[in-house]
Amino acid sequence: MAGERRRSRERVLGLLYEAEQKHATLDTVVAELPSPPEPYAAQLAAGLAARLAELDALVERHAHAWALDRMPAVDRQLLRLGAYELIAEPSVPVAVVIDEAVDLAKIFSTEESGRFINGVLAAIAAECRPGEVVPG
């Protein structure tokens, strides 16, 4: 299951990136796929599409001195994805959400991005899921 969720996160990261590059909505990009994404990816994509403005506000509030449009595109998408899982997927532990986002940043962005994403998502987790263990 963990491998399936990792693949789903990677898929949604790609879809978010594609939507931004095409100046399209995430819903439009998903609707144009030749076959539907796996169930968890579809769930994440639908939730992200419905709450994008809320997620952007949450990320900007916790990304001190970093406007969304100044962030690298991959980092921005990973923060949106991680923030969504933190607020809307309570069955996924905080440590898993943050570790997955950091791992994806190391693969698709930079080592520095991993530290930045870790800090922003840890701050969001402290607000949204107080009392849960946040990785250090």
Image (cartoon, rainbow, N blue to C red):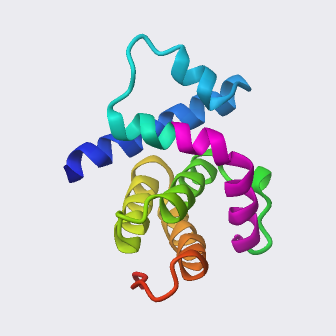
Residue 52 in view here: yes
Quarter the C terminus occupies: bottom left
Instruction: Say which residue appears at 70% left-offset and 24% top-offset.
Output: 24
Instruction: Say which residue appears at 63% left-offset and 52% top-offset.
Output: 76
Residue 115 % position (x, y): 51, 72
Residue 13 in view here: no
Residue 114 % position (x, y): 48, 65
Q: In the image, is residue 28 above or below residue 82? A: above
Locate residue 111 relative to residue 23 in the image: left or right.
left
Q: Nearer the viewer, residue 106 or 43?
A: 43
Instruction: Say which residue appears at 56% left-offset and 61% top-offset.
Output: 83
The number of discs equals 0
Q: Is residue 67 magenta?
A: no
Q: Is residue 60 magenta?
A: yes
Which residues lie in the magenta part? 46-63
Residue 68 % position (x, y): 75, 55
The image quadrant that residue 62 belongs to is: bottom right
Residue 58 % position (x, y): 70, 65
